[in-house]
Image (cartoon, rainbow, N blue to C red):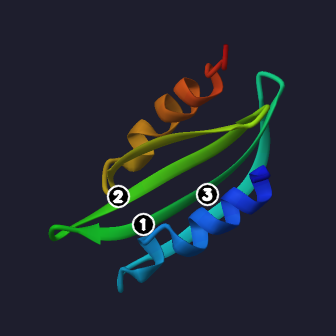
Amino acid sequence: MSLDEYYQTFVTYGGLEELSSYEKLSEGEETINGLKGKWFECKYKDRGIFVTNLIYLIAKCDKIFMLTSFSSTEKYPKYKDNFLGMIKSFEAM
């Protein structure tokens, strides 16, 4: 399965869109250390608290790596740069 196919399958059938409070905030493509990736940000209510989730799918050969980071929506802006720093340091061996 290609990165595009996996991304579409995950976004469509991954279960998050089934949540009544689900909202996709943004999405895009990015190269991380030479590896093609796709990402999206979303928010939804989990156990009474709104959370924001940043998910990257990165392809290498026949593998897809999923990097996920999330926090309460209230605190997400405080942690987003840290999340991005960790994601951008990813290297597949």
Name the spot of residue 9 as percent of width and height, x first.
63, 67
The furthest residue to the top: 93
Name the spot of residue 12 as percent of width and height, x first.
59, 74
Q: What is the secondary structure assignment of the residue under circle 1?
A: strand
Q: What is the secondary structure assignment of the residue under circle 3?
A: strand
In the picture of the structure, the residue carrying the numbered disc 2 is: 73
As shown in the figure, which amino acid type bears the numbered disc 3?
Phe
3D distance between C-alphas at marks 2 and 3: 15 Å
Asked if disc 2 and disc 3 are in contact, CB closer than 8 Å, the reply is: no
Q: Within 10 Å of the Cα at label 1, are there few (<14), some (14-19), or many (20+) other Cα atoms?
A: many
3D distance between C-alphas at marks 1 and 3: 10 Å
Q: What is the secondary structure assignment of the residue under circle 2?
A: loop
As shown in the figure, which amino acid type bears the numbered disc 2?
Thr
Name the spot of residue 31 as percent of width and height, x first.
80, 35
The furthest residue to the bottom: 20
The reply, left or right, for residue 84 in relation to residue 70 is: right
| Quadrant occupied by the C terminus | top right
In the picture of the structure, the residue carrying the numbered disc 1 is: 43
Asked if disc 2 and disc 1 are in contact, CB closer than 8 Å, the reply is: yes
